[in-house]
Image (tube, coloured by chain):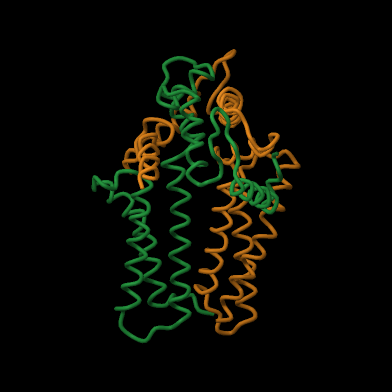
Chain colours: A green, B orange
Amino acid sequence: MSFLPGLVQTTAVVLSFLLPALLFGYAAIPGLRSPGRRFRASAFTVAGLLLIACLTLPGPRDFGDVFSAVFLLATAILLCHVFWSLLAWPFTLTLLTAIAKAEHPLTLEQWISACTQGEGPTAFAENRLRLLFGGGMAVSDGERIVMTQTGMAIVRLVRLVRFATGLGSSR
Amino acid sequence: MISFVYGLIGVALFVALAPAMVSSAQRAGLSTPPAILLVLAAVIAHGLSVALGAMSVAQFQYWNAASIFGFGVMSYVFAFGAVYKSVSLEILLDVAQRPEHRAPLADIVDRLVPDIFRRRADILVDGGQVERIGASFAVTTKGRAFAGKLARIRRAFAVGDSGLYDFAEAEEQAAKSADP
């Protein structure tokens, strides 16, 4: 049994640790201030560096070494995305930070307003619906929201994933 | 190359173990967060698959097995996280239940959005970070301390601490997609 990583595997592990540093460092670049853009730039940077390493590192390439290095880096990117999402777009935690700033107890309506920077539930719903419209999952029909075939396929997939992951079907 | 197979065996073990643990905890009414259960399932599955590989294969390559296992588990966690508490998907699932799969926007705004916020408020109340005071809510000492830590981390990474979602970014993206 060998616990020693190969050369490309070691590079992938090092690049995995570089990813959070890039997320931190790229904040200094004005064009990468938005969390989504910054994450994409960081992920593409480490992927590019791994590709360069595969082409330039000395010695013969072992297929297993390269193959597993790609999966190690992909794992790190997914893991970082989970934590980055919690940091950049946390729903429940934003509720907490919003109420922590309030100087007095808030009703639910006041709390929603504080969370949406005073925009209220309409802006919040429109913000979330924009994702569904952008993904072709729903369309607006005047004052109604209509689900598309793509939306229905996504709903079936979500129900399947909920069932397969033990979450059950909430609806 | 056989080491990769033991990575896949680990993923299979995890996929069998994780849903069983999550659904058992839900049925038993345990308040253990699903994230803890997923970590526990991953540790057990990884330990078992690596032990099996080490005993069966003389030249077992740990990192080959770990790469496949890590990717499989993270893909699962990614899918789990997406369906667990996504607001957009909650709205989509709600519309899917309606006749002809259509819902008035006013109903989403007046009923569903407050419901979504109420359920998240309940999570914070159950976690002891927020308390109910009559019809209002107030942060507890524990909640304020946690919010302070979170705000410091967000500021360190320059992701802001102003409010829910980046409305400006979403508007920018919408403008881009509308622009041919």
User: Is B173 located above or below residue A157 in the figure?
Assistant: above
Task: Report x, y in % for residue B144.
Answer: 45, 27
Q: Residue furthest bottom?
A: A60
A15 left or right, relative to A144:
left
Q: On the image, which quarter does residue A11 sit in?
A: bottom left
Image location of residue A30, percent across then percent down: 24, 45
x, y percent for residue B139: 49, 23
Q: How many marks?
A: 0
| Picture layout, residue B11 above or below residue B110 | below
B100 and B166: which one is in front? Answer: B100
Residue B127 in view: no
Q: Residue at x 46, y 22 (%)?
A: A113
Image quarter of the C terminus of chain A: top right
Please tell me whether residue B34 is drawn above or below residue A143 in the rendered image: below
Looking at the picture, tell me which residue is in the foreground, B85 or B94.
B94
Residue at the far left: name it. Answer: A29
Q: Residue at x 41, y 22 (%)?
A: A118
**Image quarter of the N terminus of chain A:** bottom right
For this orientation, the residue located farthest to the top is B134
- Tell me the quarter of the picture where residue B60 sits: bottom right
Regarding residue A127, the answer to whether it shows in the image is: yes
Q: Position of residue A57 (x, y in %)?
A: 31, 79
* Residue under the image location 26 percent in, 47 percent down: A31
